[in-house]
Amino acid sequence: MTGTEGIKYTNQRVEILNFIRDNFTHPTVDDVYEGVKKKLTRISKATVYQNLKFLTNKGLIQEVNIKGVSRFEPNLTPHHHIICRNCGSIVDFESKELTDFSLELIKKMKEYKIESTNTNFFGVCDKCK
Amino acid sequence: MTGTEGIKYTNQRVEILNFIRDNFTHPTVDDVYEGVKKKLTRISKATVYQNLKFLTNKGLIQEVNIKGVSRFEPNLTPHHHIICRNCGSIVDFESKELTDFSLELIKKMKEYKIESTNTNFFGVCDKCK
DNA sequence: GTACGTGCAAATGATTTGCGTTAAG
DNA sequence: CTTAACGCAAATCATTTGCACGTAC
């Protein structure tokens, strides 16, 4: 893993990182706080904020903003999201095909140097149908 | 235009709506407030918030959240966004081809009833290159 | 005339910051 | 030992709400 040199692995930081790595539900700041607090009862929310920013900057986790809410995920590879407008659940949608198609299409826009792309799908999940 | 019956067209509401209809830069709440204040100097920010929500609910404008910031746009048709990571500029990218491709692809996910889709492109614009 | 909208100030909620203390390397 | 991280409380910033007054229809 690159960028991991010189990181102080405090208990708090490790628990936050592990929590996100074990969670594919795209937890919010509060989700992370509540989850980590079960092990580290004295952790403060400021520490959670600080570490989520830190880990994101280090590229160890990724931040996604969905409908104005910050969420965090361990999946660092290019992918897409399917979002249920009823229950708010979010699942990853891996499709290199879609990523490639999007990037190919955007090449026509010569004014831009595009670096990444992602597609959001909004609809209703199985449970909510 | 549907849904426009029974709307009280106050000065404030009309100016806010016109401001967004004339602006294709995806203004934030503050951008709208500053812009409309030039004509209606006594308008309050609460009124701007209330009307942006109101107009969005009525389907007269659309809200997009980009990197955690709420923005508003007059473009009601399905489209995509190109975002410069340097200057933050956002431009619309019309591509029925991409929308259709995305929707076709997602049909394989039988668990979901997808209603809409949109793609964000991140990169560097001409000026910032 | 009535219901809805407005402006203002206060309330709420999310996130950041300052600072004295603690712990990783 | 030294520097970065922690916990806590206060500060900041975005957004919402309560209410007395104003205005569209």
Image: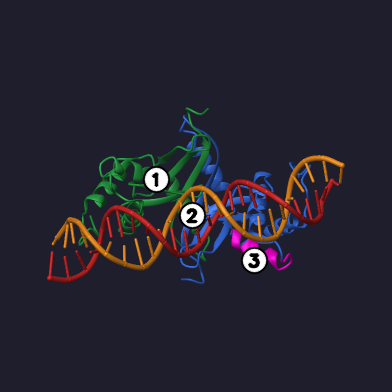
Chain colours: A blue, B green, C red, D orange
- Is the same chain shared between marks 1 and 3? no
Residue A4 drawn at (x, y percent): 76, 44
Disc 2 crowd, CA 10 A, few/some/many (<14, 14-19, 20+): some
Q: Quadrant of the N terminus of chain A?
A: top right
Residue C22 drawn at (x, y percent): 79, 56
Q: SS for tag 1? A: helix
- In front of the other: label 2 or label 3? 3
Q: Magenta region: which residues?
A: A29-41
Residue B13 visible, this orientation? yes
Label 2, on which residue? A68
Q: Which of the chains bears the disc numbered 3?
A: A
Please tell me which residue is depicted at 46% across the width and 33% down the height of the picture. A108
Label 1, on which residue? B30
- In front of the other: label 1 or label 2? 1
- In front of the other: label 1 or label 3? 1
Q: Do the numbered discs 2 and 3 sit on residues whose CB atoms are within 8 Å?
A: no
Tell whether position A33 is magenta.
yes
Q: Which of the chains bears the disc numbered 1?
A: B
Magenta stretch: helix, strand or loop mostly: helix
Disc on res. A34 = 3
Amino acid of disc 1: Asp
